[in-house]
Amino acid sequence: MSGVARRLVTVVAVTTLLGSLPAATPASAAESVDWQPCADAPGVDCAAVTVPVDWAHPDRGTTTVALARRKAADPQARIGSVLMDPGGPGGSGTEEVKNGWSLSPEITRRFDTVGFDPRGIGSSGRISCGLDELIADHPRVPRNQAEFDQLAAYNRKLGESCDRLSGPLGRFADAKSVARDMDAVRIALGEPKLTYYGVSYGTLMGQQYAELFPDKVRALVLDSNMDHSQSTAAEFLLGETRSLQAEFAEFTAWCDRTPSCALHGRDVSRLTRDLQDKAARGELKDPQSGEPVEPLDLAADIQGSSYVPSWNRLATVLERLADGAAPASLRDDIPINYVFPSVFCDDWRMPVHDFAELETYRRVAAAFAPDVKVNPLGWTAVTSCLGWPDPASNPQHPLRVHGAPPVLLLSSRHDPATPYAWSQTVARQTGGTLLTYDGWGHGAYFKNSACVVKATDDYLISGRLPAPGTHCAAVEPGAASTIARPPSTISF
């Protein structure tokens, strides 16, 4: 991978006022959606709903929210529509649905599956940023105050280009605005109440929908939750990193017990730490390109392989890096998402004031995670906001949900991107029911667990929740999924 491409990957790879306002309804949302066949996806319909850019001032311009729908397979048994978001920030629900993303056959039999692109993303009104600003050289892990200042200046110039090219939309990309968009979509779909499945960053949109519109909730499934009540960069980054380190420990245990693992019989932890040390000294090279493999790149390989999880592939990557053979790198599989800072930095206020503070966080994270050193997605999230020119309009706060029916939360016990503890916190704050998958990876519904799928489907169809404290047994990694097709988004 070229240095420019690697920098592009890094850019992405990682209630007060509006809560008191009545929900404005755009004119187009008062009518039914004008579905038309998608030109690039047979059997899928496409449409768009018009919404205000600024929900506090609906007269100050509009943008669009793109939709893609697969109709219920059994019209006679149809219950309604299930709105779906694959996470990100930056995941395209329309592209995922057009490419076959779905829940179980029982859900697709009884619901229209409707994916949407949150504002700024994909086929919706888009946030665009300057290419020159995006690919400008910048340090990803500052080594001193001068490099810290250089990174902040890079982020500031990038954000200014996004505002220049996108207008006010770039300053209204937060999850609360998306939640209001979701209600406009609900109205346009003709649904009296919302049925929703959101995974990863899509859970934040669902959480805030429940806060804003508790009486409009039919069923919310929030899978692999963001915890928007964390107040500091240190808390966020340490939670992220400890979760990835714990997942790596699960990988090493799997490799010890699995003869087919490429590193079976070797000390995987020691091998990985040796690779990290070589990367830190600038001595670890990509045998294909000859470019240095930096510690953050190595951590990104580990995290990317932990989502499914794809542990056979990770073992091969580490083996080939250690032996100097051309690695089957995972980095090219991470989607490039240009809207990440516009969204994340509008939803999170986690100031880091100088290099000394950032370096303290990095060292503390590494002390808790001797193999992975840092969670690259968490690191990118925190450092992308250094110097960002627009203040967070939707900063963190504990959830306050009153009057909504109980929601269902899902989480893998070993999640490399949204720690299990985050879902536990959201369950306490919302009073929702947490269903725990005692296995590995990100997105519990798609881990080939019939237990998770049945409990979730029962809730979506009838509103019946699993018993509090329900756990579903782990399914050994490597089993091919026959339950549903997961989204391809690799992010929160």
Image: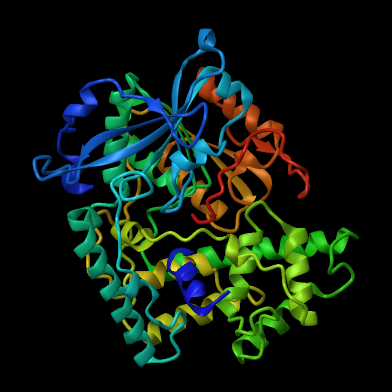
Q: Nearer the viewer, residue 301 or 367?
A: 301
Q: Nearer the viewer, residue 384 or 433?
A: 384
The image shows residue 356 at horizontal and vertical percentages of 39, 87
Residue 466 in view in this figure: no
Res. 214 image quadrant: top left
Residue 70 in view in this figure: yes
Q: Which quadrant does the N terminus fall into?
A: bottom right
Q: Residue at x 56, y 52 (%)?
A: 420
Side of 355 where 163 appears, left or right: left
Determine whether 380 is above or below 394 in the image.
below
Q: Residue at x 70, y 36 (%)?
A: 449
Q: Residue at x 15, y 33 (%)?
A: 22
The image shows residue 185 at horizontal and vertical percentages of 31, 30
Side of 81 where 480 appears, left or right: right
Count of numbered badges drawn on the protein: 0
The image shows residue 402 at horizontal and vertical percentages of 32, 33
Side of 399 where 331 appears, left or right: right
